[in-house]
Image (cartoon, rainbow, N blue to C red):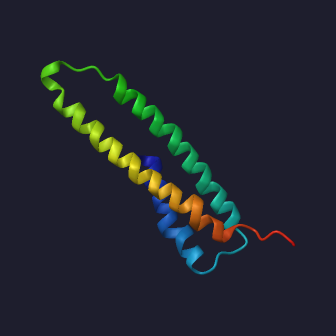
Amino acid sequence: MDELEGHMFKEEMRRFPMMAQGGNALMQLLVDDMMQEHARHGVDTAAMTARLNALVVPQAQQATPAAVKVGWQAFLVELAKHVAAEDDALFLMFQPVSPA
């Protein structure tokens, strides 16, 4: 959670405002950093999914972990949309132009 909040803070306070202004010489480094963070989020969320799937609770208490799993799946869907929007659309606008 701390990593995700740090990532979002950097996006909202530094990277997105810089992108809105057209970027600068550091933009490719910032984009590379964001993509590396996205990759780490994928590793971290897979680990959390494994932990949730391994969770064993008494039958009488199944409702709570089931609700957590539903919420977790919804979060993963939203995170995937966020990453795809940035990696597959937004970041492409700041890729260096190759000479023809």
Quarter assignment of residue 86:
bottom right
| Left or right, residue 94 beside residue 74 | right
**Where is residue 36 shown, x and y percent of the image?**
61, 49
- Residue at the image point whose x is 63% and y is 79% from the top: 22
Q: Residue at x 29, y 36 (%)?
A: 69
The residue lying toward the viewer, choosing from 78 and 28, is 78
Looking at this rendering, what residue extends furthest in the bottom direction?
21
Q: Residue furthest front?
A: 100
Q: Is residue 10 above or below residue 99?
A: above
Image position, residue 39 (x, y; %):
57, 45
Q: Residue 96, relative to residue 45: is it above or below? A: below
Task: Please tell me in which quadrant of the rendered image residue 52 appears.
Answer: top left
Q: Is residue 23 above or below residue 88?
A: below
Front residue (pair 58, 80): 80
Image position, residue 8 (x, y; %): 46, 59
Who's the residue at 51% across and 45% down the image? 41
**Relative image position of residue 11 (x, y in whole percent):** 51, 64
Quadrant that contains the C terminus: bottom right
Q: Is residue 66 left or right of residue 73?
A: left
Say if 54 sits above or below 33 in the image.
Answer: above
Which residue is most to the left?
Answer: 60
- 11 left or right of 65 in image: right
Q: Tell me the residue at 58%/58% (across/down).
A: 87
Most foreground residue, 82 or 30: 82
Q: How many tags in the picture?
A: 0
